[in-house]
Image (spheres, rainbow, N blue to C red):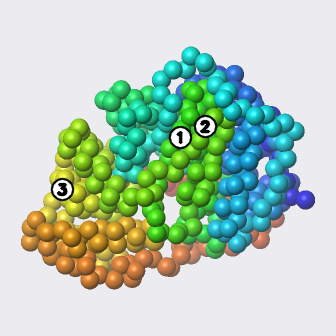
């Protein structure tokens, strides 16, 4: 029977380590040690909470293989939450098989707080400074949420991402200091601990995008925060929605996943799902006019120390700001009327690989364009084009590059012993190439 066994967690100051053992058929998916580092001491956090971060990463992998998971101790509330999340994921994906969680102890930690004198806020928000998380801050700013930023997914633990992580920390810290907010910075090998290329090799045909984005990141990112919320006495943990009502994409962070995640006295919330992306920008625009005229957003796909201004996401955000009555250059986007021509050409020449996420977001913009009076001839020309453009034709359906498809096909049929020898060399080469390109 396929299984994953999680050894009792070990803590040292701010660091959590957890050894993981798998049956041979799952060794190619899951590493042997999970590591997470918090910026608060976690030595006094009970094992039932310390096991949550690693369970949040491995359980979806187990469910994809019909495997059982064994753990010494887990909070009773989180154990029930996993059943709810599993049901949602199984209803979303036919390839998931399920599995059972077995725990020797399931303490009820509701009401337990690591530091009775923790003080401060009782809410927290996963925060990057982009449109979605900034909208959630604006919506909940009266609660003065602690801003939580995570290194381990889009910013990897690899040395070549040190500068990006430093840029993110600086930006979030500045935003928090200006508003008198607390911050928390978490680092983990949560994604490298999972063998993402191998997961893609097996399951990319079933998901639209990566394994973590399509299956694991709602449960994974929220679960990673459990020791922090215990120590800091956090009752409400918010994660900003990417999509909105009416978009039924298979995605790892949705209300029917995130709203089920809970442990102890902490409840997680998939936030602002009732607002489209343009409506979120509208909310931010109101906040800018009322309280924060110099607010800077960071959404760029290419850099972390500002916005490049020429990637699809920068253009999309800049147009959204224009539609909300703001001038993009005042908020981090070097966008002028001349850029409308380049934006249209980028679409028509296939410069970007767009997914259904971007399709829905540009359709959202197009709906607002129909209600908006252009402010210049260039804007009028672009709006006229956008209203008639076949956006679906701009969505890429070609799949991954051939080299990646060959790797995935080979990986699915490679014995573990051979794969474990060859893949690390390929991964090191890929990492080195990425570092050089940067």
State the image quarter where residue 268 is shown.
Answer: top right
Q: Count of labels shown?
A: 3
Q: Is residue 174 left or right of residue 339?
A: right
Q: Nearer the viewer, residue 163 or 109?
A: 109
Give the labeled residue for mark 2.
266
How far across and down, in percent of the image, does residue 331 sit?
23, 47
Left/right placement of residue 211 relative to residue 410 reads left
**Mark 1, residues whose alpha carbon is within 10 Å: few (<14), some, or many (≥20)?**
many
Tell me the quarter of the picture where residue 38 sits: top right
Counting other residues with Cα less than 10 Å from the Cα at mark 3, is it few (<14), some (14-19), or many (20 or more)? Answer: some
In front: mark 3 or mark 2?
2
- As helix, strand or loop, the secondary structure at mark 2 comes to strand
Residue furthest to the top in view is 117
The extreme right residue here reads 1
Task: Say whether marks 3 and 2 touch (CB < 8 Å).
Answer: no
Label 3 and label 2: CA atoms lie apart by 38 Å
Q: How far across and down, in percent of the image, does residue 335 sit?
A: 19, 57
Residue denoted by label 3? 325
Q: Residue at x 53, y 76 (%)?
A: 399
Q: Give the Cα distance between marks 3 and 1.
A: 31 Å
Q: Position of residue 69 (x, y in %)?
A: 82, 50
Q: Vertical placement of 402 versus 325: above or below? A: below
Find out whether the residues at labels 1 and 2 contact each other: C-beta distance under 8 Å. yes
**Is residue 335 visible in this depiction of the protein?**
no
The numbered mark, 3 or 1, whose residue comes first in the sequence reads 1
Real-space Cα separation, disc 1 to disc 2, in angstroms: 7 Å
| SS category of the residue bearing label 1 | strand
Dividing the picture into quadrants, the one containing residue 73 is top right
In this rendered view, identify the residue nearer to me: 383 or 212. Answer: 383
Q: Earlier in the sequence, mark 3 or mark 2?
A: 2
Disc 1: which residue? 237
Q: Quick check: can you spot residue 297?
A: yes
């Amino acid at each position: 029977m396929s299984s994953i066994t999680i050894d009792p967690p070990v803590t040292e100051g701010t660091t959590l380590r957890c050894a993981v053992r798998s049956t041979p058929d799952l060794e190619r998916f899951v590493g042997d040690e999970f590591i997470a580092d918090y910026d608060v001491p976690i030595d006094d956090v009970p094992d039932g909470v310390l096991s949550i971060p690693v369970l949040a990463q491995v359980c979806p992998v187990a469910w994809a293989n019909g495997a059982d998971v064994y753990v010494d101790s887990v909070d009773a509330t989180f154990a029930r939450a996993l059943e709810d999340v599993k049901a949602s994921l199984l209803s979303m994906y036919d390839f998931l098989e399920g599995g059972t969680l077995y725990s020797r102890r399931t303490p009820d930690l509701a009401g337990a707080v690591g530091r009775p004198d923790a003080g401060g806020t009782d809410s927290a928000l996963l925060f990057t400074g982009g449109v979605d998380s900034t909208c959630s801050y604006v919506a909940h700013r009266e609660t003065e949420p602690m801003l939580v930023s995570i290194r381990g997914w889009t910013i990897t633990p690899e040395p070549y991402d040190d500068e990006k992580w430093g840029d993110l920390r600086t930006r979030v810290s500045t935003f928090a200091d200006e508003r008198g907010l607390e911050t928390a910075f978490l680092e983990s090998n949560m994604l490298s601990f999972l063998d993402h290329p191998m997961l893609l090799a097996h399951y990319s045909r079933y998901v639209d995008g990566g394994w973590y984005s399509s299956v694991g990141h709602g449960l994974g990112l929220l679960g990673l925060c459990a020791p922090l919320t215990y120590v800091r006495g956090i009752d409400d943990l918010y994660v900003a929605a990417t999509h909105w009502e009416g978009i039924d994409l298979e995605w790892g962070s949705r209300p029917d996943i995130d709203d089920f995640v809970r442990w102890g006295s902490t409840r997680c919330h998939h936030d602002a799902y009732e607002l489209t992306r343009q409506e979120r920008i509208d909310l931010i625009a109101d906040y800018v006019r009322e309280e924060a005229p110099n607010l800077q957003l960071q959404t760029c796909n290419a850099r972390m120390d500002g916005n490049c201004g020429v990637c699809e996401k920068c253009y999309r955000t800049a147009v959204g700001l224009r539609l909300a009555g703001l001038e993009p250059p005042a908020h981090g986007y070097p966008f002028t009327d001349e850029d409308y021509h380049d934006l249209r050409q980028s679409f028509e020449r296939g410069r970007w690989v767009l997914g259904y996420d971007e399709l829905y977001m540009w359709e959202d913009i197009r709906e607002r364009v129909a209600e908006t009076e252009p402010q210049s001839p260039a804007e009028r020309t672009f709006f006229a084009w956008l209203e008639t453009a076949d956006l679906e034709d701009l969505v890429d359906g070609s799949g991954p590059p051939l080299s990646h498809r060959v790797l995935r096909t080979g990986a699915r049929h490679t014995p573990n012993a051979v794969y474990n020898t060859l893949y690390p060399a390929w991964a090191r080469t890929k990492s080195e190439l990425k570092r050089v390109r940067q």
